[in-house]
Image: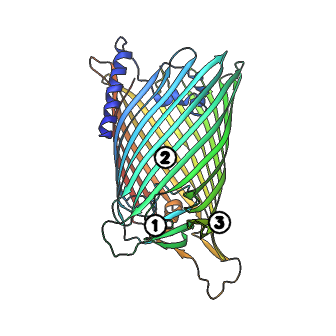
C-alpha cells in the first residue's frame, strides 16, 4: 500500500505541477536537473542557508525505477541476485525573492536472494559486525527504505541568509531464514547555518551539524528448532568471539538491541570568484560516539565507540558562454575506536538485579580514508541543456583495521584506486531529446589479507580467537581484485501531447567483472539492468 501511494504521489504530483507550470508555454528545450544543480556547488552543500544562491527558474523531477542485478561479484553481506523498485520526487523552488526551498521524497523496495554475512543492513562503517558463523544459512532478505529531505534558505538582509536542512531516512529489513533478524533503521541529519556574501568576489557560510543514527536488531528462529546457530562478534578482520543464539548477549533472544550513533560538529564553506573562474571549498569536522545495547542499570551496554570525522570538498569552475568546466576533489577521514564492556551481575538489598561495569577492553581501531579527483564538463549548453556531458576521474580508498583479542591481534591494511569515465550526448530527434551514455571504470587494489600477531607469548590455556575465513577472503577479493565495469544507457525525453509534460523513459545496463578471483567468491561478474520512467517540471 505504501509503495502504491508513493507511486501515485510521483506521477500525479508531477502531472499536476507540469500542467500548471507549462500549460501556457511552448517547450523549446529540456532543462537538465543535474546541470542546474552542479553549476552551483552551494546547492550540494549541507548548508541550507546557501539555497538563496539558486538563480534558475523553479525545477523539479520525478521518477519510478526498477533494477535487477545478478552475479557473484558482490561483497560478503550483499546479494548475488537482487531486485529493487522505487520512486522519488525532488524540487528546487523559489517561494519569493528572499526564500528558496529544496525538498525530496523517495522510496525503495529491495529484495535479495541467498543473503547472509552481516546482520546489519550495511556494516561498512560500523564499529564491529555481527557476522554469521556459517555460509549454509543463506536466505532471502527484504527491505523498505524511505527518505525525506527538506531545506530552506531565507535572505534576511542584503544577501545575508539563514537556513536549515533536515535529511531523514527510515528503513525496515528482515531475513526470512534462520537465524532470522529484523532491522529497524533510522538516520537523522540536521543542520542550521548562515550564508554571507562579501561583495561580488567572495562569500562564505557556516553551519552546525547534528546526526543521530540507530539500527536496532531482533534475532529469532521459526518455531521449534534444535539446530544450533552461532554468530561471530567480529571486532575487525573477521576475528572475535562466537556467540550461540538462545539467551542474552549480542544476539539477545528476548530483546531488540540498538546500535546507537550520535554526531556533532560543524562545517565552513567559502567561494572566491575572479572573472569566469570560481573556487569553492567546504570543510566539515564532527565527533561521533555511540554504543550497542540498552543504557539502563538493569540491562547491558555491550560496547562503546567514538571517532573523529573530517571531510573536505573543493571545486574549481570555469564558465564560458556555452561551456562549463569543473575540477572536483574531496577527501574524508574517520578514525574510530571500539571498546568492549566488562560487567558483573549483582543484586541490591531489595533483591533486584543490576549490572556493575568495570574498565572496558579495547577491541578495535578502524581508519577509513576516501577521496576523489574528477573533471566534469557540460559542453554546448543552451537554455540549461548541454549537448555533451563528460565526467572522468579517480576514486581512492584506504582502510586500516586492527582487531584486539588479548594477547592476539589482527591487522589489515588495504586500499584501491579506481579510474572512471562517462560520456553523454544529447540529440534532438522526433521533437524529443535522445540521450546516449557510455562509461567504464577500472579498479585495482593493494595490501595483504591480514597480518596476525601477539603482544606477548600466549599461555597454554589461551588460543587464537574465533574467525570467519570465507568472509575475510570474500571481502578482500571484492575490494582489491583487479576488476572493470562497462555501462551504457539510452534515454528519450518527450512532450506528452496536449499536456506540455516533459516525460522520459530510460534503460541502462551495467557489467562488472573481476579479472581473477579465488574460490571464496561466488562468481567473477555481476550484471544489472535498470528501467526508469519520469518527468521534469
Of all residues shown, which one is farthest toward the bottom?
Answer: 460
The residue identified by callout 3 is 357
Direction from residue 259 to residue 424 in the image, left or right: left
Q: Tag 2: Cα neighbours inside 10 Å, few (<14), some, or many (≥20)?
A: some
Which label's residue is closer to the chain start, 1 or 2?
2
Residue at 56 percent across and 45 percent down: it is: 212
Distance from label 3 to label 2 (Cα)? 28 Å
- Residue 37 pos. (x, y %): 52, 29
* In this rendering, position of residue 487 left or right of residue 402: left
Whichever of callouts 3 and 2 sits on the residue coming sooner in the sequence is 2
Q: Are marks 1 and 2 in contact (CB under 8 Å)?
A: no
Q: Name the residue that disc number 1 marks.
A: 517
**Residue 130 image offset from top left, x and y in percent:** 49, 64
Callout 2: helix, strand or loop? strand
Query: In 3D space, how far apart are the residues under numbered discs 1 and 2 (Cα atoms)?
Result: 36 Å
Answer whether residue 174 is visible to the viewer in this image: yes
Q: Which comes sooner in the sequence, label 1 or label 3?
A: 3
Determine which residue is flagged by label 2: 186
Instruction: Give 124 or 213, whichever is nearer the viewer.
Output: 213
Amino acid at each position: 500500500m505504501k509503495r502504491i501511494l508513493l507511486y501515485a504521489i510521483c506521477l500525479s504530483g508531477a502531472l499536476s505541477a507540469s500542467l500548471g507550470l507549462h500549460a501556457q508555454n511552448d517547450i523549446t528545450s529540456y532543462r537538465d536537473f543535474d546541470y542546474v544543480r552542479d553549476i552551483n556547488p552551494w546547492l550540494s552543500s549541507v548548508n541550507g542557508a546557501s539555497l538563496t544562491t539558486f538563480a534558475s527558474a523553479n525545477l523539479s523531477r520525478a521518477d519510478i525505477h526498477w533494477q535487477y542485478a545478478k552475479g557473484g561479484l558482490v561483497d560478503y553481506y550483499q546479494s548475488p541476485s537482487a531486485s529493487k523498485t522505487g520512486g522519488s520526487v525532488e524540487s528546487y523552488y523559489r517561494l519569493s525573492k528572499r526564500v528558496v526551498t529544496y525538498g525530496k521524497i523517495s522510496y525503495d523496495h529491495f529484495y535479495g536472494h541467498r543473503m547472509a554475512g552481516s546482520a546489519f543492513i550495511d556494516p561498512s562503517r560500523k564499529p564491529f559486525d555481527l557476522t554469521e558463523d556459517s555460509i549454509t544459512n543463506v536466505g532471502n532478505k527484504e527491505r523498505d527504505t524511505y527518505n525525506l529531505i527538506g531545506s530552506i534558505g531565507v535572505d534576511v538582509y542584503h544577501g545575508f541568509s539563514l537556513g536549515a536542512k533536515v535529511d531523514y531516512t527510515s528503513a525496515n529489513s528482515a531475513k526470512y531464514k534462520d537465524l532470522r533478524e529484523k532491522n529497524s533503521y533510522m538516520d537523522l541529519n540536521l543542520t542550521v547555518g548562515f550564508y554571507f556574501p562579501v561583495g561580488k568576489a567572495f562569500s562564505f557560510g557556516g553551519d552546525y551539524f547534528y546526526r543521530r543514527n540507530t539500527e536496532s536488531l531482533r534475532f529469532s528462529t521459526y518455531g521449534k528448532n534444535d539446530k544450533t546457530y552461532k554468530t561471530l562478534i567480529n571486532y575487525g578482520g573477521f576475528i572475535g568471539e562466537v556467540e550461540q543464539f538462545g539467551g542474552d548477549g549480542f544476539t539477545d533472544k528476548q530483546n531488540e538491541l540498538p546500535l546507537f550513533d550520535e554526531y556533532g560538529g560543524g562545517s565552513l564553506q567559502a567561494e572566491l570568484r575572479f572573472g569566469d573562474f570560481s573556487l569553492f571549498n567546504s570543510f566539515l569536522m564532527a565527533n561521533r560516539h555511540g554504543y550497542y545495547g540498552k543504557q539502563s542499570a538493569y540491562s547491558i551496554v555491550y560496547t562503546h565507540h567514538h571517532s573523529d570525522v573530517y571531510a573536505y570538498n573543493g571545486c574549481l569552475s570555469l564558465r564560458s558562454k556555452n561551456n562549463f568546466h569543473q575540477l572536483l576533489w574531496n577527501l574524508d577521514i574517520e578514525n574510530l575506536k571500539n571498546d568492549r564492556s566488562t560487567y558483573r551481575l549483582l543484586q541490591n538489598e531489595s533483591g533486584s538485579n543490576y549490572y556493575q561495569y568495570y574498565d572496558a577492553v579495547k577491541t578495535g581501531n578502524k581508519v577509513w580514508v576516501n577521496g576523489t579527483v574528477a573533471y566534469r564538463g557540460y559542453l554546448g549548453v543552451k537554455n540549461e541543456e548541454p549537448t555533451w556531458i563528460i565526467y572522468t576521474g579517480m576514486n581512492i580508498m584506504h582502510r586500516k583495521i586492527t582487531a584486539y583479542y588479548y594477547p592476539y591481534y589482527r591487522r589489515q591494511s588495504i586500499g584501491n584506486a579506481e579510474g572512471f569515465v562517462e560520456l553523454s550526448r544529447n540529440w534532438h530527434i522526433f521533437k524529443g531529446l535522445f540521450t546516449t551514455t557510455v562509461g567504464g571504470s577500472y579498479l585495482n587494489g593493494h595490501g595483504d589479507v591480514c597480518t596476525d600477531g601477539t603482544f606477548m607469548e600466549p599461555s597454554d590455556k589461551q588460543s587464537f580467537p574465533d574467525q570467519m575465513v570465507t568472509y575475510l577472503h570474500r571481502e578482500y577479493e571484492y575490494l582489491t581484485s583487479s576488476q572493470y565495469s562497462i555501462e551504457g544507457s539510452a534515454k528519450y525525453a518527450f512532450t506528452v501531447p496536449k499536456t506540455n509534460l516533459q516525460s522520459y523513459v530510460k534503460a541502462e545496463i551495467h557489467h562488472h567483472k573481476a579479472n581473477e578471483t579465488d574460490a571464496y567468491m561466488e562468481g567473477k561478474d555481476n550484471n544489472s539492468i535498470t528501467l526508469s520512467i519520469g518527468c521534469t517540471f
